[in-house]
Image (cartoon, rainbow, N blue to C red):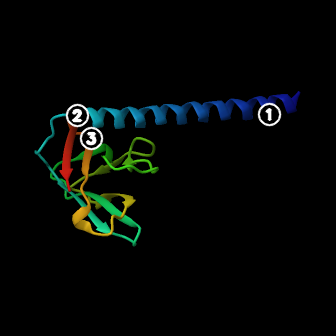
Amino acid sequence: MKKYLLLFCCFGSLLLLTGCENQQNKEYYQAVEELQSVSTFDTEKDFQLELSVVPFTDRELQYQLILDEPNVLMQDIQLLVIHDQVTDDIFPSLGILDEKVTLDPEHMTTKGIILMGYLPNPGDMSLFHAEFRVMLSYTTVDQNVITRNYQYIY
């Protein structure tokens, strides 16, 4: 009987973990689809947000999205960066598939956030053209959820 109870507990835990993982995957792909369909972008920023693309190897470019220097408390941050290039890699994200973080200008325990990804290197950077889209969502000190979308053209 104890064997069956142990087996049932293990199986139940596995189902629970799989269900949570599937929900997170759904949220991630839903966020990607929503960001792909955005037609207007924000310019207002209460923080520094920079995107750069640099050669990493002869075959790869590395893109980095840096979020830092907040002017306001940013709690439960969700961040996603997508692009229009063909790749097998998933898009880098924070707070959707993993833990959300907080950036607090008063108590900088976390200095900033960097998301990185890789793309095929065309060899000549003048031949590289891409559109990057960024979704940033966070909760303010007043418990308001702010979601902003940004666009970067290379």
Are there few (<14), some (14-19), or many (20+) residues within 10 Å of tag 2? few
Q: Earlier in the sequence, mark 2 or mark 3?
A: 2
Q: Which residue is mark 3?
A: 138
Residue 16 figure quarter: top right
Which residue extends farthest bottom?
58
Q: Can you say whether 27 is above or below 135 in the image?
A: above
Residue 15 position within the rendered picture, expressed as x and y whole percent measured from the top left: 65, 30
Whether tag 2 and tag 1 are in contact, CB under 8 A, the answer is no
Residue 35 figure quarter: top left
Q: Is residue 142 left or right of residue 94?
A: left
Q: Earlier in the sequence, mark 2 or mark 1?
A: 1
Residue 80 position within the rendered picture, expressed as x and y whole percent measured from the top left: 33, 45
Q: Earlier in the sequence, mark 1 or mark 3?
A: 1
Residue at 22% in and 47% down: 73
Q: Give the CA distance from mark 2 to mark 3.
A: 18 Å
Q: Which residue is mark 1?
A: 6
Q: Can you say whether 143 is above or below 151 in the image?
A: above
Whether tag 1 and tag 3 are in contact, CB under 8 A, the answer is no
Residue at 80% in and 33% down: 6
Label of residue 38 in the image: 2
Give, as a three-letter code, the residue at label 3: Tyr
Q: Is residue 86 left or right of residue 138?
A: right
Q: Can you say whether 144 is above or below 82 in the image?
A: above
Residue 102 position within the rendered picture, expressed as x and y whole percent measured from the top left: 31, 49
Residue at 32% in and 46% down: 82
Q: Is residue 150 left or right of residue 102?
A: left
At numbered mark 3, what does the secondary structure look like: helix, strand or loop? strand
Q: Can you say whether 101 is above or below 117 in the image?
A: above
Give, as a three-letter code, the residue at label 1: Leu
Are there few (<14), some (14-19), or many (20+) residues within 10 Å of tag 3? many
